[in-house]
Image: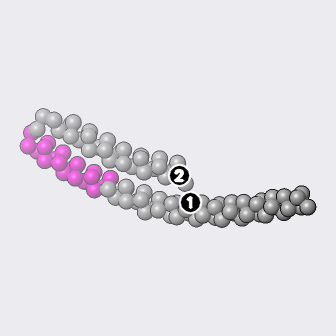
Amino acid sequence: MRKRILLAFLGASAAVAASAQGQGLAGINEATSLMTSYFDPATKLCYAIGAVLGLVGGIKTYSKFSSGDPDTSKTAASWFFACIFLIVAATILRSFFL
């Protein structure tokens, strides 16, 4: 009698555990699909921010060059590498998570 009760309890426990794992897996898959749907707009946003920063940096560098500032090359390099970093960071994050 005890063995039957124990076997019934273990069977019910296994069924509940299997059901809970299936629901958890569905939740994880749904969260993954939601996160991957945000990567395309986020990547395009990073590219747009990089383009705007590039234009602002170009204007700033041109104004320094026109005024005869000696550190024009430093300003140009910092803005150039900031834009490159934004583009590369967006591309690398996309390749890691998709």
Q: Amino acid at mark 2?
A: Phe
Rendered residue at 16%/35% (across/down): 71
Magenta span includes 59? yes
Q: Position of residue 29 (x, y in %)?
A: 61, 62
Q: Which mark, by number, is residue 97?
A: 2
Rendered residue at 42%/59% (across/down): 42
Q: Secondary structure at mark 1?
A: helix
Q: Of label 1 and label 2, which has the lower sequence position?
A: 1
Return the residue at label 1.
32
* Colouring of the image: one colour
Q: Position of residue 37 (x, y in %)?
A: 50, 64
Q: Which residues are magenta?
A: 50-68
Q: Farthest residue toward the right?
A: 1
Q: Position of residue 53 (x, y in %)?
A: 27, 52
Who is closer to the viewer here, 84 or 92? 92
Label 1 and label 2: CA atoms lie apart by: 10 Å
